[in-house]
Image (cartoon, coloured by chain):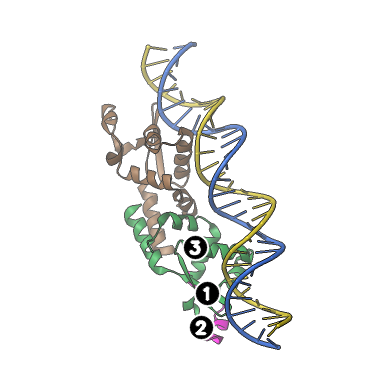
Chain colours: A brown, B green, C yellow, D blue
Amino acid sequence: MGMEPLLIYKALSNEMRCQIMQWLKNPEEFFDEKLYLQQGLNFRIGVCVGDIQAKSGLAQSVISNYLATMQKASLLESERIGKWTYYRRNEKTIKQFSEYVQTKL
Amino acid sequence: MGMEPLLIYKALSNEMRCQIMQWLKNPEEFFDEKLYLQQGLNFRIGVCVGDIQAKSGLAQSVISNYLATMQKASLLESERIGKWTYYRRNEKTIKQFSEYVQTKL
DNA sequence: TCATTATATCTACTTTTTTAGATTTGTAAA
DNA sequence: TTTACAAATCTAAAAAAGTAGATATAATGA
């Protein structure tokens, strides 16, 4: 459960993965919430893989792999509901990392 | 002159390079300043490549290359005096990076 | 000038990461 | 149950990063 700076640096050392962090920071700015609301959900649960993949333009397997990388670094967490997996930021880790950079780097 | 987060994440996504950042944060804790003082220098100018290389145990060419990578990310700056090149942290960039992580990540 | 030392650059090999197609797994709907 | 869809995993090829020996450059001292 401990935050691992090296894993986080590696996860963030890729432009698209950084981009995904930004998209998930303000999903309403980058994705359409309508279909989520229709299902009784909202972006608090995260954004599903397919939406992220479509926005990225990369292959499904690549995005799935990127998201797994970011989850292993615990920058993201995921929840499966029905056929969909929703990814959202893990703000706790992000805060810990930010504090690590501030005090330890 | 602008701080580039992606270059910085890449530079830090390697254990030895992270280690070097730590060594250069408190050189007096990890290196012997005597020979520097004898030359009218101190660690404020930085630590020379040979000392960093000896401590790392890696090949000279590898360390030279690592230091160049970190300098390109502007995490480090260097100064040549005679035969020696001294590397020190660029605290300005480090601060900017820390603020970037805090506010933008 | 010549030899020595410190560092950077060049070169080649190895390892890791990126990338994407194909397959598998899990879920839901027909 | 079959079918369809979303996402994860498998596989393999291409690109990038890591590694270290050899060579080049730059400075010093004999």
Q: Measuring 40% from the left and 38% from the top, which residue is drawn there?
A: A56
Q: Quadrant of the N terminus of chain B?
A: bottom left
Q: Which residues are magenta?
A: B25-40
- Secondary structure of the residue carrying tag 1 is strand
Question: Does label 1 lie on the same chain as label 2?
Answer: yes
Amino acid type, label 2? Leu
The image quadrant of residue B98 is: bottom left
Looking at the picture, which amino acid does disc 3 mark? Answer: Met
Label 1 Cα crowd, 10 Å radius (few <14 / some 14-19 / many 20+): many
| Location of mark 3 (residue) | B70
Q: Which mark is residue B86?
A: 1
Q: Is residue A87 above or below residue B58?
A: above
Which residue type carries mark 1?
Answer: Tyr
Q: Magenta segment: does it hold B14?
A: no
**Residue at the spot 29% in from the left edge and 43% down from the top edge:** A26
Q: CA distance from mark 3 to mark 2?
A: 23 Å
Tell me whether circle 2 and circle 1 mark residues in contact (CB < 8 Å): yes
Main SS category, magenta section: helix
SS class, disc 2:
loop
Q: Would you say residue B37 sits in the magenta stretch?
A: yes
